[in-house]
Amino acid sequence: MWWRFREALDPEGEHKAAIPPDRKLAAELGAPIWRLRGNRILIESKDDTRRRLGSSTDRADALILEWHGREDAAYRRVRQEMRESWQARRRRTRPWDPYGIDETADPIAGF
């Protein structure tokens, strides 16, 4: 997640993410050390970062988790809208009744 967020902050990238003007947040985002191992990028663990800095990167973690969850939230929102649309469409249409019985009519009214 950290590396994807780093790429999202690239002004030439496709995500165009930005961070609020907060010096502590900027420092936390730049704190973890990374290195290449073969073709993989390894990012320092949260515990190692906390030990090295003497404090946690909670603000950065919160921002990255929120940014990472944006796609899930958008997916849930679209899915809910589709479900509501389907339910509304279903309420408007009545199932075919081969006997022509009107379920909304009063059954005793004809007697």
Image (cartoon, helix red, strand yellow):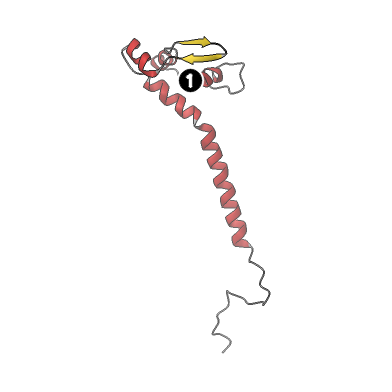
Residue lying at the far right in this picture: please name it.
98
Task: Locate residue 34 relative to residue 75 in the image: left or right.
Answer: left
22 and 79: which is toward the camera: 79
Q: Residues within 10 Å of mark 1 (few under 14, many from 20)?
A: some
Quarter of the image where the C terminus is located = bottom right
Q: Is residue 97 above or below residue 81?
A: below
In the picture shown, does residue 65 fall above or below 81?
A: above
Q: Is residue 104 left or right of residue 1?
A: right
Residue at the image point whose x is 54% and y is 33% from the top: 71
Question: In the current view of this chain or complex, which residue is farthest to the front?
Answer: 38
Please name the residue shown 41% across and 26% down the image: 62
> Image quarter for residue 24?
top left
Frontmost residue, 11 versus 73? 73
Q: Residue 5, image x and y in percent?
A: 51, 21
Q: Which residue is mark 1?
A: 2
Indicate the position of residue 108 as horizontal and vertical percent values.
54, 85
Q: How many marks?
A: 1
Identified at 32% across, 15% down, the residue is 55
- The type of residue carrying mark 1 is Trp
Question: Residue 69 appears at what percent x and percent y?
Answer: 49, 32
SS category of the residue bearing label 1: helix
Extreme residue toward the left, this view = 54
Return the x and y of residue 73 as percentages of the image width and height: 51, 37
In the depicted structure, whether residue 87 falls above or below residue 80: below
